[in-house]
Image: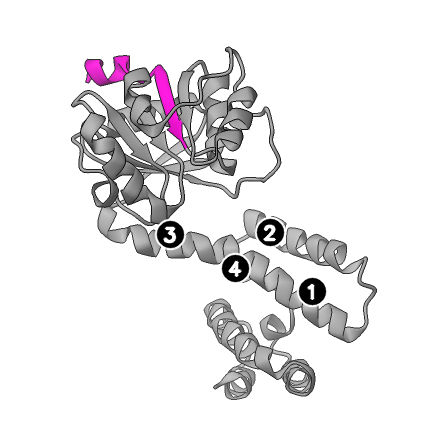
Amino acid sequence: MAILWRFTINVGIVGAGRVGCALAVALGRCGYRITGISSRRRASAQICAGCVPGQAPPPVVELSELPVLAETIFLAVPDDQLQAVSQSLQPVLQPHHVLIHLSGVLGAAEVIAHPNALSFHPIKSFSRRKTQTNEFEGIFITLEGTPTALPVGRAIAQRLGANVLYVDSAQKAVYHAALCLASNYLVTLFDLARGLCHTSGLPEDVIPQLLFTLMSGTLENLQRDPVENALTGPIARGDVQTIRKHLDALAATTPDQLPIYKMLGRYTLDIVRRKQQVSLDRLIALTDLLKD
């Protein structure tokens, strides 16, 4: 293990998108030396290299050159490119290399056939804006991989100031689906609500801010209170009449969104039942309204 730890100072990065650049900045800020960056788009790699703090811009190199320059290599590319990238690296890898991919859904062994293979998944929605801050500080990172690579991943994550979790490879798809619901589909819900606000006639320029204020308040409630107490609104109150008005309005204006509203309403009813503060007759009436 001491051998692997010795090789975590010089780092190469494949991919110069938002996560690859954020990783390069964070690693540089935490004392790691970025010794090479490789990307299909050379211009993107050059921009990323120029963002690395605390050193001269690392060289932009071909993929096959990276293992000569770095012993720890991060694959910060989209999931559908990971296997092709790892296969291209395979002929030039040595046993001492540590190969780390950032996919949330793919296991280490699915991507990298190497004794020091690791999945290192940062639980964060990264901004498109370039920043010189360590975006990994305070977030959670899940690790999964070979026994020799896991301690390396833990050491890097902790040095970045992140919290470390472990996930079984067989459960990664379920784990990742949960994160998609919480993050990606939050944007979808925002967009659906924005469309309905537009349909209602609200001024277009204020809609994003009013929704952001509302959603931020809900997230603050969730951070402070149990789910059952954080929930507000007509279903939480057992307000049958309001839900009926919602359904009638959606049926008349945006019928394609009616199934989505009903499905989410049924899940919300499950939360309300756990709290046991809405009468049985109201729960029955709401269940009847929200059924398919």
Q: Mark 1 points at which residue?
A: 194
Residue 85 place in picture, x, y as percent: 31, 38
Indicate the quadrant where residue 141 lies: top left
Q: Give the range drawn in magenta.
A: 1-14
Q: Does the magenta stretch include residue 10?
A: yes
The crowding category of the residue bearing disc 1, from other C-alpha atoms within 10 Å (few below 14, some 14 to 19, many at least 20), is some
* Figure coloring: one colour
In the rendered view, does 104 fall on the left or right side of 271? Answer: left
Q: Which amino acid does label 4 sit on?
A: Tyr
Counting residues from the N terminus, which is met first, the one under dot 3 or under dot 2? 3
Instruction: Work out whether 18 lies above or below 26.
Output: below
Residue occupying the far right of the picture? 203
Residue 156 place in picture, x, y as percent: 36, 24
- Residue in the image at 43% along x and 33% along y: 39
Dot in front, 2 or 1: 1
Q: Mark 2 points at which residue?
A: 219
Q: Name the residue under label 4.
A: 185
SS for callout 3: helix
Counting residues from the N terminus, which is met first, the one under dot 2 or under dot 1? 1
Q: Which amino acid does label 2 sit on?
A: Leu
SS for callout 1: helix
Tell me if label 3 and label 2 are in contact, CB under 8 Å: no
Tell me if label 1 and label 4 are in contact, CB under 8 Å: no
Q: How many numbered marks are there?
A: 4
Q: Is residue 233 magenta?
A: no
Indicate the quadrant where residue 122 lies: top left
